[in-house]
Image (spheres, rainbow, N blue to C red):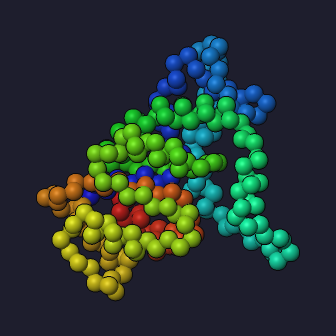
């Protein structure tokens, strides 16, 4: 089955940095520098590799149990939406230049990501900061050759079963699942469709934002997603 799934940071170490540019660390921040020797480029690149292994850190972080805090929100005053938005607009953007430089660097990886998807690999992006905007730009640039399903895992009321039903109905699989069909049953229907060499839709991109969000973190849902990704 060729269901191509972009989950959430995976960078290819074989992909060169921007010509004459390197990411260097200054006062604990990552910045873009144009004046470095070849050997300095190699040394400074190790700093960026800490983010390159982000997808491995995702699995390492999830091997240990999280600690539950005994603090409560009972004594905390809540803000309404207007007050919250007013405060947020006054907060200055930190490290704006560094973020823009790193974003441009990641955009240079778009073609590499697309090639990896087309050859059957899945992409996992993990680390500090939202990747939603970056992945949306990636999809706009390269993922228009096949249907794209976006799952916003950060939504607390997300219902994955309804999303799977939309997939089945949206690409016209020619089957009508029963209303009581289980999530595993829907997963099998989708997998069997993409196992058919004569199918009309050859592949489907599934982009999941926040794959370990509240609505997606159960073992059942994770198993079903892994089946589609296999």
Residue occupying image coordinates x 36% and y 76%: 184
Relative image position of residue 48 (x, y in whole percent)? 61, 34
Relative image position of residue 51 (x, y in whole percent)? 60, 40
Total residue callouts: 0
Relative image position of residue 122 (x, y in whole percent)? 41, 50
Residue occupying image coordinates x 52% and y 63%: 153
Q: Quadrant of residue 98?
A: top right
Residue occupying image coordinates x 60% and y 23%: 22
Seen from this angle, which residue lies furthest bottom? 180
Q: Is residue 168 above or below residue 33?
A: below
Give the quadrant of the N terminus.
Answer: bottom left
Residue occupying image coordinates x 22% and y 62%: 195
| Apparent side of residue 188 relative to residue 196 in the rendered image (left or right) | right
Relative image position of residue 82 (x, y in whole percent)? 71, 61
Give the quadrant of the C terminus.
Answer: bottom left
* Residue 193 visible in the current orientation: yes
| Apparent side of residue 36 relative to residue 174 in the rendered image (left or right) | right
Q: Is residue 95 above or below residue 4?
A: above
* Residue 70 visible in the current orientation: no
Seen from this angle, which residue lies furthest right? 75
Seen from this angle, which residue lies furthest front? 82
Tell which of 44 and 74 is nearer to you: 74
| Apparent side of residue 122 relative to residue 88 in the rendered image (left or right) | left
């Amino acid at each position: 089955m060729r269901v191509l799934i972009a989950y959430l940071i995976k960078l290819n170490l074989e992909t060169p940095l921007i010509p004459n540019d390197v990411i260097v660390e200054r006062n604990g921040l990552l910045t873009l520098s144009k004046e470095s020797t070849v050997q300095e480029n190699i040394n400074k690149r190790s700093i960026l590799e800490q983010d390159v292994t982000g997808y491995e850190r995702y699995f390492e972080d999830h091997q240990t149990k999280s600690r539950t805090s005994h603090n409560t929100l009972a004594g905390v005053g809540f803000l309404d939406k207007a007050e919250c938005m007013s405060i947020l607009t006054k907060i200055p953007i930190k490290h704006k230049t560094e973020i823009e430089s790193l974003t441009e660097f990641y955009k240079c990886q778009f073609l590499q990501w697309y090639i990896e998807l087309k050859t059957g690999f899945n992409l996992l992006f993990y680390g500090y900061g939202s990747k939603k905007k970056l992945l949306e730009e990636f999809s706009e640039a390269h993922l228009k050759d096949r249907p794209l399903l976006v799952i916003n895992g950060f939504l607390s009321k997300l219902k994955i079963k309804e999303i799977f039903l939309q997939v089945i109905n949206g690409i016209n699989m020619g089957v009508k699942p029963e209303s009581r069909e289980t999530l595993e049953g829907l997963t099998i229907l989708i997998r069997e469709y993409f196992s058919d060499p004569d199918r009309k839709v050859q592949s489907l991109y599934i982009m999941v934002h926040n794959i370990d969000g509240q609505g997606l973190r159960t073992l059942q849902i994770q198993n079903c997603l892994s089946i589609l990704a296999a």
